[in-house]
Image: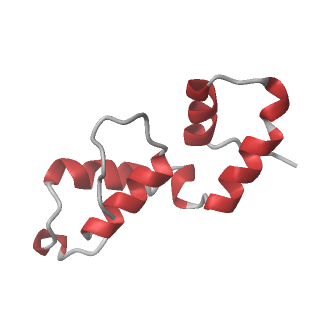
Amino acid sequence: MKILEGNAGALTNVKVLDFLRAKGASKDPTRVIAKVAQSEYKVYDYLVDTAASTQTRESINELLASNKQYDLAKAEALNILNIGPVADF
């Protein structure tokens, strides 16, 4: 993964998690070998325990399509994606 333009906009947690995985972040105990900063590992450790670890591009597109009727702002849609709504049955 290559960053084309810095500060181009907000990222979803899924994209951040993908980026950190591409850099070599993992739960592997020998992770000190990878080119990932300690602060990036803290972010990685947090994100793998959130909805971002189970979301896919398809599920994101489906969620955005189903919420189109509500005319949400980009920031609102981003918050919904990052929080990861769940349904209890």
Please indicate whether residue 7 sits to the left or right of residue 9 in the image: left
Residue 26 in the image: state x and y as whole percent. 31, 69
Residue 86 in the image: state x and y as whole percent. 73, 45
Q: Is residue 26 visible?
A: no
Q: Is residue 7 visible?
A: yes
Quadrant of image for the N terminus: bottom left
Classify 17 as above or below 73.
Answer: below
Classify 47 as above or below 81.
Answer: below
Q: Tell how many labels.
A: 0
Relative depth, front residue between 20 and 26:
20
Q: Residue furthest front?
A: 4
Residue 23 in the image: state x and y as whole percent. 25, 66
Q: What residue is rendered at 19% in x and 47% in y? A: 39
Please indicate whether residue 76 sits to the left or right of residue 7 in the image: right
Q: What residue is rendered at 22% in x and 74% in y? A: 29
Residue 31: name its quadrant: bottom left
Q: What residue is rendered at 35% in x and 59% in y? A: 19
Residue 3 in the image: state x and y as whole percent. 29, 53
Relative depth, front residue between 58 and 26:
58
Relative depth, front residue between 74 and 16:
74
Classify 53 as above or below 72.
Answer: below
Classify 70 as above or below 89.
Answer: above
Q: What residue is rendered at 57% in x and 34% in y? A: 78
Please indicate whether residue 71 sits to the left or right of residue 83 in the image: right
